[in-house]
Amino acid sequence: MLADFLIALIMLTNFTLVASSRINKTIQVAVTQGVILGLLPLAMGLWRLPHIIFIAVAAVTVKGWLIPYLFRRAMRKVNIKREVEPTIGYSISLILCALGTGLSMVLAHNLPLKAGTPNVIFLPAALSTLFTGFLLLVSRGKAITQVVGYLVLENGIYIFGLLLVEEMPLLVETGILLDLFVGIFVMGIVINHIRVAFDSMDTRHLAELKD
Amino acid sequence: MAWFLIFLPLTLAALAYWTRSPQLRLRLLPLTAVMHLLGLLVTLLLAALRGWETLPRGVWLGLDALGGWVLLVISVLFCICAFYAPAYLKLRPERDHRIFVACFLVFLGLASLLAQARHPGLVWVAMETTTLTTAPLIYFNHNRHSLEATWKYLIIGSVGIALALLGTLFIAYSAHMGGLSEPLQYVRLMQESHLLSRPWLRAGFVLSLVGYGTKMGLAPLHTWKPDAYGETPGVVGALLAGGVTSCAFLALLRIYAVVAAAGETQFARELLIGFGVLSMAWAMVFMVRQVDFKRMLAYSSVEHMGILVLGIGIGGVATRFALYHLAANALVKGVLFLSAGNINRSYASRQLPFVTGAIRRTPVSGWLFLLGFLAITGTPPFAPFISEFNIAAAAFSQGFVWLGVVFLVLMGCIFLAMSDTVVQVVFGTPNPHRVRTPYKDTAATTAPLLVALGLALILGLWLPRPLEVMLRSASTWVEGKP
């Protein structure tokens, strides 16, 4: 019950993400989403298993503390506040996000879950979050917003992973943690290089290579 | 032995990172490569003597014919690159090569892990980490353009890898639906494939194809490729085009084998053929009037990734020749990227109006570039001719007549498109306004290329019996019979 409520909250944050024009707010929403997801396994009643406590703690620490810290550090050095002129406008992004959510419902309908799974809403939520991440990745020009997009995409995979975490903890946990590490750590380094080289974090500077 | 192949390069990479002596660091490259290749040959020999028997289900690491073949290709290519790299790095004294050498060696260790991994999760971890270690290699030049290429590589590659993770989880869920529990080694998945839930398996395959296909550089997911290959040194381009892509192809083949074991080939093959033809056609369009010869090679790599998946999609004999093509493509791409790197050094440019008449300025590299071009476009007697010819023949004999015709037409058009650029680069009259550089072909920058081209020639004329047995065993695995 609580888990379903949290998932509904996640799906709402997806809409906030694509509609917000201030980068600070986008980061805040993504962090909130990450923390909710970190707490989700506990809400699912899996708190008896020690390794699930571990992944919850890891997810909350990384998504709720480490990532915002890295983002704030990157933001302080470059003075940017707004995502100016996204490739896809905010209202169109909202419509696309709604369409994506609807499409996830249809897709999830075609992938039957194991009989007796209590959390039927997880699959559409995972797919729609994945789609939101994609949308942010392709429609935003700032390197930092693209990393937020990657994070959201990652969150989608995490939601799906929760369906399997009881049966296949090793696979799910290594996958999710490693993916997260890569996204943040490496892209953080590259963002730093972009900042030094261009004195800004706009990836539109990175558009000189073409045919 | 499995651990030796993984940890030898990793240990020496740590040594290369910590040592202060550049001479020692440069010597570590060929040393590691030779030791790795010898270790691999011993492992393969032992496995071949046992007749490539199927490894037990519960094993996490082990070399079968398929993984062995891919790792052999990577190890040979790595050896060629490792003998070339010290000479190249000496030409670039302004760039610190500590991270370069370390990442280069780490890649070999991770490729060994990937080739020997028997579990989809482990393969995924290895694939993810190869993305990480190759990113600093792409950023070697430390300028704005290489930064752009690295950013694209990381963002697009990471999204691909994330999708592959989701695909892996989907396949795990399909096993979960069938009542299987961890650990789900490939052999186990294949032997109990009748239990796998079909919708999840199909969805998992599509996600893996898109995910690992991004790392291979199949169109339309290849957009990072021309930038990354164009901006890196030729030696990194060679390793990416023959090594990283082979790793991703292997990861995809492992999943395909599970799908084939479950009897879902029909649907998978249509997808593979679609991606294959699209990649070839897309590459052809962008090769026409391509003024940048390194980008042209990148599109050629897209084309050959297309041929690989096309071969798997056609199936039967073509599967074996797709695996053979992996080796042919890696060797010839090595020649092409390394000679292109030499020409690039000599002209300080890789754009057409500035780079002409390479055969006079750098005769050996010019000839090698020309021969490499002829080899890759399917001129006998080089190895790519054998595989390309047999894949086309298999298409005709297995009822894909239209596909065979399209394949041959595309190959012909690509030959014409590439020859336009190559002929100008190699022959053409030298531009009087070109930049003068001190670069001259030396034995160190050309001998490894000659070896690679020689190997491609030998492989085209004669496939040793043990290798043929290994290829047959590998292709039965791909067809879903462990």
Image: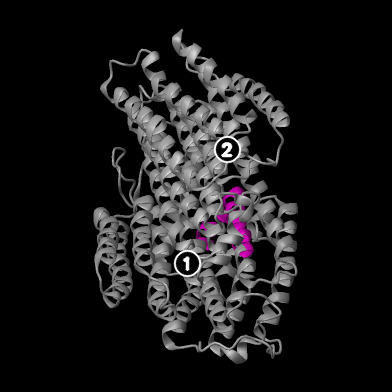
Q: Residue at x 51, y 14 (%)?
A: A120
The amino acid on which the numbered mark 2 sits, given as a three-letter code, is Val
Nearer to the camera, B321 or B441: B441
* Quadrant position of residue B228: bottom right
The residue that disc 1 covers is: B236
> Where is the N terminus of chain B found, in terms of image quarters?
bottom left
Start-end of magenta stretch: B299-327
Instruction: Determine the chain carrying the residue at label 1.
Output: B
Scheme of colours in the image: one colour
Label 1: which secondary element: helix
Q: Are marks 2 and 1 on the same chain?
A: yes
Label 2: which secondary element: helix
Nearer to the camera, A170 or B275: A170
Instruction: Determine the chain carrying the residue at label 2.
Output: B
The amino acid on which the numbered mark 1 sits, given as a three-letter code, is Val
Q: Position of residue B373 (x, y in %)?
A: 62, 75
Q: Which mark is residue B206?
A: 2
Q: Position of residue B273 (x, y in %)?
A: 65, 48
